[in-house]
Image (cartoon, rainbow, N blue to C red):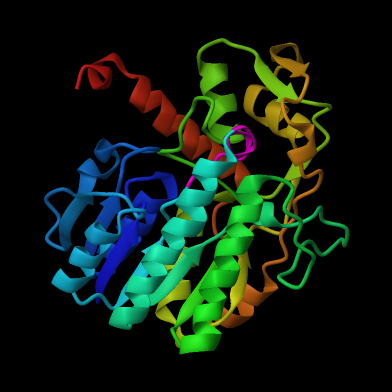
């Protein structure tokens, strides 16, 4: 197939690109590099199936129109977005423009050119998990941040194109994804930040009491899920979760990473109103519809992530 990946140089995006290339599809990447870097795809730059990297913005209708006119895509994996919850509270306008208006622009091109779209949403649209089985796609959503609100709005717009125009669409909601190529600074995920701080001999800072839980999904499992959702027609029109079905408190995660209680400190939450206290995924729909299950355990995923972060810290690599 001919595949467009928006946000393809981002953390999850580059793994989606890798999976598509491994499956021998021709891939085009569109990314404005606002939240990523082109070096994330250096591994693929000579790959026969990576056709083009376009530095461009999904808010630029002309760039999108020219790209869709030049290439008759079979499918678009739409991952480009503002993804930081705290930033969305401080600057909701930017998040809305990227996540809602940008998604509308991509949708319009997909409709005009009859291109299936897989829309990357998030578990942050949900309210806290109450049932022992975890959060299913039928559970309540709660826009606790402008990020969550923008993703819910974009999801509804995507699904409206399925019902109004018959456009093949899938909405995917991965739970908290971590792994190699995730940022290790303020905009990164908790696993990457904890590992990086441990390696640097810094304290692992936890917002609030640390009792909040997360269902942590390794990035290659996430990419496999996202790509598979695009392959199967029976997923069209559906919202689908992906996670491990196991959650861990941030306190326990910090101990798993550091093995040292003295290296952990608690700090006041910047935006406590946006915190979801319990995130636990029920991925039974993904298993039934896509025959998908996670393969990498949290312990193995943390080990792989730490090895990658260590490698990127090597002096010889810093100079390159």
The quadrant in which residue 49 appears is bottom left
Task: Indicate the position of residue 260 as horizontal and vertical percent values.
Answer: 71, 17
Q: Is residue 305 left or right of residue 246?
A: left
The region drawn magenta spans 82-90
Task: Estimate the x, y position of residue 290 in percent, counting from the top left.
Answer: 54, 78
- Whole-percent x, y for residue 252 in the image: 76, 33
The image quarter in which residue 11 lies: top left
Q: Quadrant of the N terminus?
A: bottom left
Q: How many marks?
A: 0
Is residue 279 found inside the magenta-colored segment of the image? Answer: no
Q: Is residue 88 magenta?
A: yes
Return the residue nearer the eye: 141 or 13: 141
Does residue 217 lie above or below 259 as drawn? below
Q: Main secondary structure of the magenta part?
A: helix
Q: Is residue 138 left or right of residue 198?
A: right
Residue at point 32% right, 72% down?
109
Residue appearing at x 51%, y 17% in the figure:
199
């Amino acid at each position: 197939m001919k595949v467009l990946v928006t946000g393809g140089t981002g953390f999850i995006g580059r793994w989606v690109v890798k999976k598509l290339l491994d499956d021998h599809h021709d891939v085009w990447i569109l990314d404005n590099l606002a939240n990523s870097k082109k070096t994330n795809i250096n591994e693929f730059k000579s790959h026969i199936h990576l056709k083009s990297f376009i530095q461009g913005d999904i808010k630029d209708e002309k760039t999108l129109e020219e790209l869709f006119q030049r290439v008759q895509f079979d499918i678009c994996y739409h991952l480009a977005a503002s993804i930081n919850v705290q930033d969305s509270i401080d600057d909701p306008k930017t998040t809305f423009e990227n996540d809602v208006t940008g998604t509308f622009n991509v949708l319009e091109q997909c409709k005009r050119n009859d291109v299936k779209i897989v829309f990357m949403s998030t578990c942050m649209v949900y309210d806290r998990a109450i049932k022992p089985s975890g959060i299913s796609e039928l559970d309540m959503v709660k826009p606790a941040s402008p990020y969550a609100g923008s993703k819910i709005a974009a999801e509804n717009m995507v699904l409206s194109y399925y019902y109004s125009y018959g456009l093949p669409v899938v909405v995917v909601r991965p739970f908290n994804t971590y792994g190699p190529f995730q940022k290790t600074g303020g905009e990164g995920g908790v696993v990457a930040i904890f590992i990086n701080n441990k390696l640097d001999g810094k304290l692992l800072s936890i917002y609030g009491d640390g009792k909040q839980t997360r269902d942590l999904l390794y990035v290659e499992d996430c990419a496999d899920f996202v790509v598979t959702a695009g392959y199967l027609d029976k997923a069209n029109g559906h919202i689908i979760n992906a996670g491990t079905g196991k959650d861990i408190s941030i306190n326990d995660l910090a101990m798993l990473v550091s093995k040292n209680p003295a290296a952990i400190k608690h700090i006041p939450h910047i935006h406590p109103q946006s915190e979801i206290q319990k995130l636990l995924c029920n991925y039974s729909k993904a298993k039934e519809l896509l025959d998908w299950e996670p393969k990498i355990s949290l312990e193995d995923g943390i080990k792989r992530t730490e090895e990658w972060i260590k490698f990127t810290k090597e002096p010889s690599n810093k100079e390159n």
